[in-house]
Image (cartoon, coloured by chain):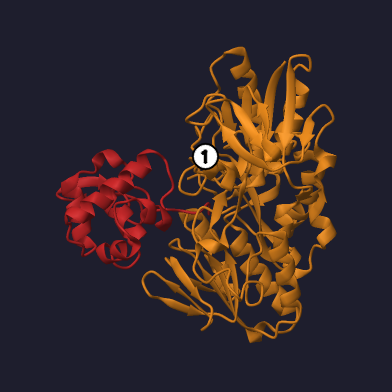
Amino acid sequence: MKKLIANREIDVNEEGYLIDFKQWDREVCECIAGECNVVMTEKHWEVIEYLQDKHRKEEPLSIRGIKRSGVINIKEFYNLFPGGPLKKSTLIAGIPKPKSCI
Amino acid sequence: MKNLIILGAGTAGTMMANHLVKKLPKKDWKITIIDQYKTHYYQPGFLFLPFDIYTEKQVKKEGKKFIPSGVNYVQKQIELINPDANTIELEGDEILPYDILVVATGSKTAPEEIDGMSGPDWYKTIFDFYTYEGAKALRDKLRDWKGGKLVVHITEMPIKCPVAPLEFAFLADSYFRKKGMRDKVDITYITPLSGAFTKPKATKALHHLLEEKGIKEVVDFNIERVDYKNNKIVDYADVEVEYDLLVTVPTNMGDELIERSGLGDELNFIPTHKTTLQSKNHENIFVIGDATNLPTSKAGSVAHFEAEILEENILRYIEGKPLKEEFDGHANCFVETGNNKALLIDFNYDHEPVEGKFPFQGIGPMSLLKENRMNHWGKLAFRWIYWNMLLKGIPIPFVPSKMSLKGKNFE
């Protein structure tokens, strides 16, 4: 489905996750962050870049990965993206939500 | 004479030994498989052991029986892989050189990764069922448990057989119903993911099962510690859940050998090319089964499909041909839902599980993503298939290594 984000038509799934990462940019990102009540700071951007890098390398995302990322610790991660930090941060980063097989 | 060494004689390693012994000319290649343990466990059976559905005998056999003659079987501890020298170091300073290495060292539970998990209450009120010891201890506990809060919990992803914890919750519901004490047991399913089901089609088809069985769901729960003194688990957002009996799936990690050898990621899984199964950092090292970091399920069926493709790629590598980029992440799993029913799911990297018929389009006899008795008998029959076909590298009839799109209801 299409969703109007930052005055552009963006392809998203039922839960609002971007389908095509090519449509993601900082403007789209800030707009989605706004909807999640997250105001982007320097630290947020660092985390977003880390997540996108993991996604590019097809490495699974996990809370443990965050712990060892060298970017941020887990408590900070929860403070930056309150309430389901992996779910929110992947939404804002324009990458798929971490999933199980079913 | 050249050397091909397989590390690990579990599901994936044993299958590879059986595949390769038939293909590599004996005059040129010596195949060696190394594993320190004598017992080969049927790991899918660990799900049934706690509920007295399987006996201890049904889930273990002597590993030696499944290693083909013509393969050199070494039962020693592996100290180190040295990829620069192309050697394996065994206990007692024994060094074995290799030309090709197949790593099949699997994954195992690491309860010590979470504070308080493997403390004084381990196997008293806190259990895993991913090990033989854990499943057996849990069976003994359940036999005379009087009821209370049962919490079924996943520590973090990825885990072996990602549906097993859900199956455990379903089977627990049946088990306590049969014992006439379901009203005394409160079952809660806790996951670090956003739901027990995370794929849209599976959620739609299956979420009712949780409601019907009265299983509560706590989602997005990333455990920080087990507060065993107060019988509760605590997550990073300070959410607390109380338990009387905690059945957890601890962190799953690759073998310490991988860490010692500097070959793994943060969970000791080896970075592997997802379509060829060649390791990313060393062209003469191949990886199969749970030891890889591939974005597919860690499951026996996956190892089986991988084995067929890896056999071909090893032969191609020897002949200096380009590797086939064939592996599609295919997995095929039965999911027990209790009351002698099960589901069947079939999926790969690109296609989520959907409804349909399997393996024959329109006919079945198995149904995808729908619970019925036929699927349950399929799951039970699978134990025979495992010992008699899968480990021996015999292809399962009508189920090719690449996933078929036929008979599936994609919209």
Residue type indicated by callout 1? Ile
Image quarter of residue B304: top right
Above/below status of B169 relative to B18 = below
Q: Is residue B360 shown to the viewer in this render? A: no
Q: B34 or A33, which is in the foreground? A: B34
Q: Position of residue B147 (x, y in %)?
A: 66, 84
Q: A95 or B74, which is in the foreground? A: B74
Q: Residue at x 73, y 63 (%)?
A: B48
Quick one: which residue is furthest to the front in this view?
Answer: B93
Image quarter of residue B109: bottom right
Classify residue A16 as left or right of residue B290.
left
Q: How many marks?
A: 1
Q: Position of residue A29 (x, y in %)?
A: 21, 50
Which chain is assigned red?
A: A
Colour displayed for chain B in the image of the structure: orange
Q: Position of residue B12 (x, y in %)?
A: 68, 39
Badge 1: few (under 14), some or many (20 or more) residues near its Cα, within 10 Å?
A: many
Classify residue B89 as left or right of residue A8.
right
Q: Residue at x 52, y 44 (%)?
A: B259
Q: Is residue B239 shown to the viewer in this render? A: yes
Reading the image, the residue beneath label 1 is B270
Classify residue B70 as left or right of residue B93.
right
Q: Chain of mark 1?
A: B
Q: Residue at x 21, y 55 (%)?
A: A43
Q: Position of residue B286 (x, y in %)?
A: 58, 30
Q: B2 or B366, which is in the foreground? A: B2
Q: B67 or B98, which is in the foreground? A: B98
Image quarter of residue B18: top right
Per the image, label 1 sits on a secondary structure element best described as: loop
Q: Residue at x 58, y 35 (%)?
A: B81
